[in-house]
Amino acid sequence: MNPLKINLSLIAATVIIVFISSCESKLDITPVENNTSGQFYTNEIEMKQAVVGIYARLGRNGTNTDFATDYFWLASENRSDLLYIAGETSAQNDQLELRKYIISPNSGTVSAIFSRLYALIKDANNLLYNTKDGEYMRYRAEASFLRAYAYFELVRSFGPVALITKPIETEEAAGLPRESPENIYAQIIADLQYAAANLSKVYTGAESGRVGSLAANALLGEVYMTMAGYPMNDASAYGKAEAALAGIITDVNARFGPVYSQLFTLANENKYDLFSIQFASGNSTTGSSLPGYITSSSASGTPFPDWAFSSFNQQGQDMRVDTILIKEMKANNDLRFSASIDTGFWSTSVPTTRTWISKNIITKFLEKDNTNSRIKAWNDYPRNFPIIRDADVFLLYAEALVRNNKASLAKQYVDRIRTRAGLNALASDPTIDDIKRERKYEFIGEGRRYFDLVRWGETEAISILTNFARNYHSKTNGQLPTKKDLLLPIPQNELKTRNNWDQNFGY
């Protein structure tokens, strides 16, 4: 087991699992829910427990699937122009409905995303409300970052939502209106600026995996780039993004991983990422569920005998990578291809009886080791999931520079990404199309593509997604995407408790 990993257990009937790197083997934490505000947040130990519990909301957190699976795989990558469903199973109907643009407000996956992010916000609000500015600044800054992150994902996925910045009663929360995106983004920016001012650049050793000021400023840059695009179209935000990212570009450059394939190994976790969800095998509630959605299999069969332990099974649909993208990456000898995608697997581990099964599947986060006895279940894989890493900063900064008519300054950052991928440097200054292409290849499987398409514009997003759906899904009871599909529906169970919210357009 990677020594930087840690299983964080709770002594209680209600368990909150925490995913933060540490050299310790086990940390027992009494649930915050069992303490009143007067009893908790009173010393360093309790503050550390509280902030680690906020991070936990992004992990499995007592559920079968983690946030990365629900949000970045099912609700993002699965809706983009990178993956298609080759064969349907009876499992995971939400995945089918999201892929075919027929998702409804009754979706359990959509509801889980919404409620998980608000649970994170609630935990962060409790910590910030029960401490004073000037004390426990490290923990307050982490809570501020995580609250900002949760609101960022809410506003770009659901549009206007309720803005809550302190503990309130359920009845009061139910009466809150949908706040304007402008006000939500103002809160996000304030929280990230506070976090950046009160955190060290990065944390290492026993504290690897905790966010630092580099992560806060990187997310701030991404927030500004999102505000500059659809639907806000605030062109002034490009300059703000450039400034935010310029301030950290030298430090991020020092953390740049020179070999793409090594970015996703257990040995290098938390070495190059700025912010990632932490996972560890060996416990039924600490591992990642994302590899369970690579491609479908019967519940009793092992789909990848050469790679997976004997009791591994799958939960998702038969997801394949776009064949056009496969051809392009192969033709270019792009090193990101072999590090992210496999073209098939053997049907058995016995050489005399096995046959090759051809399927282009994303295996970037699958730990290929059929002797790994620490992996206990399909949702117990050890790979961290990166939310912000070196290439995010380089390519977002380059994009901001190009948008601000400084393409010559952007070239070195685009070239750095290309040469790491085994490609030649650009022959001239980068264009927006160059950057879009690099982002598509660089982040395969990481859930960036769908949100990139949306911020690049309504017309472009619908056109690209429509052409893809027409090729793969519109003839299998799917629909072609429309404007409504640029947001998720507000969960129906949320609307039932409120009489002042309208459903998102088209649902």
Image (spheres, rainbow, N blue to C red):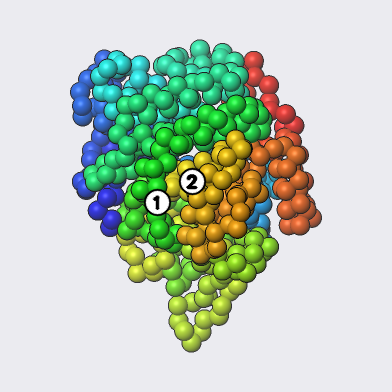
Secondary structure at badge 2 equals helix
User: Do we see residue 229 in this rendering?
Assistant: yes
Q: Quadrant of the N terminus?
A: bottom left
- Report the residue at 37% width, 29% height from top: 196
Q: Quadrant of residue 33?
A: top left
Left or right for 367, reference 29: right
Q: CB of mark 1 within 8 Å of CB of mark 2? A: yes
Residue 498 shown left or right of residue 262 in the figure = right
Q: Is residue 161 above or below residue 223?
A: above
Say whether residue 387 is visible: no
Labels 1 and 2: the sequence-earlier one: 1
Q: Amino acid at mark 2?
A: Phe
From the image, tell me which residue sits under label 2.
394
Count residues near mark 2 (Cα–Cα under 10 Å), then give few for <14, some for 14-19, many for 20+.
many
Marks counted in the figure total 2
Where in the figure is residue 376, as x and y percent of width and height? 36, 58
Q: Amino acid at mark 1?
A: Phe
Residue found 59% across the figure and 23% down from its top: 181
Residue 106 occupies which quadrant of the picture? top right
Percent of width and height locating residue 261: 44, 62
Where's residue 165, x and y in %? 45, 18
Question: Relative to 355, is 490 above or below?
Answer: above
The label number, if any, that marks residue 256 in the structure image: 1
